[in-house]
Amino acid sequence: MTKSQLALILFFPTLASAQPLTLSCDGHGSVISTQSTTVNQYDAKTKDNKLGVAQTQVRRQFSGGSTIEISSGTGRMRIPDAMIPALMSGDSNGWYPIENLFTNDREITGVVHINFLSQPKLRIDRLTGKLSLTGGAGEFAADCSAVDLTKPKF
């Protein structure tokens, strides 16, 4: 037994004895995206056409799913593909750590560390199963249900 496991048992016995929890969540959200438009401008004085590109930021809607695993006071999350930024750091097979994890009978909260710029806040209402993930470059809302990994689904 490691020192951190021993400390967990001594100082947080309810967390140490808690059963592992796996959630499957399906929902929808939006992410900030860049949209490019070609602009054609005619100059009457020189009788020339000038081409250019204008870029604007827009919110792009998406549907997707995520998985959350919580065990022994630590958590990790697979976020929807649309929320994965181009600059990723430290992910392990699509899993991102949940930092500052807090659980009680009513909610689960934390911060999903995707990269140094994107660290959205996570909140799951344990009574309704509603998940919200906000911050970074987007937001995601979903309905979650517990998955029993010891039994086949069908």
Image (spheres, rainbow, N blue to C red):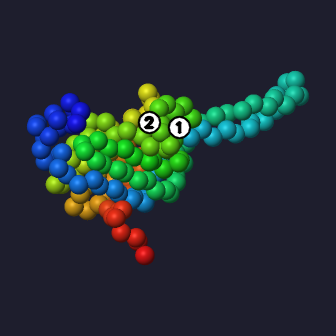
Q: Is residue 98 left or right of residue 12?
A: right
Q: Quadrant of residue 120?
A: top left
Mark drawn on residue 85: 1
Q: Front-most of 112 and 13?
A: 13
Disc 2 crowd rating (10 Å Cα; few below 14, some 14-19, many 20+) is: many
Residue that appears at 26% across and 62% down: 128
Q: Is residue 126 left or right of residue 26?
A: left
Please identify the residue farthest to the right as the structure is shown.
47
Q: Amino acid at mark 2?
A: Ile
From the image, state whether disc 2 or disc 1 is nearer to you.
2
Residue identifier under label 2: 114
Q: Residue 6: where, in percent of width, then height?
A: 17, 35
Residue that appears at 89% across and 28% down: 47
Labels 2 and 1 touching (C-beta < 8 A):
yes
Residue that appears at 50% across and 43% down: 93
The reply to whether residue 28 is visible in this rendering is no
Label 2 to label 1: alpha-carbon separation: 8 Å
Residue that appears at 45% across and 47% down: 79
Q: Is residue 128 left or right of residue 88?
A: left
Number of labelled discs? 2
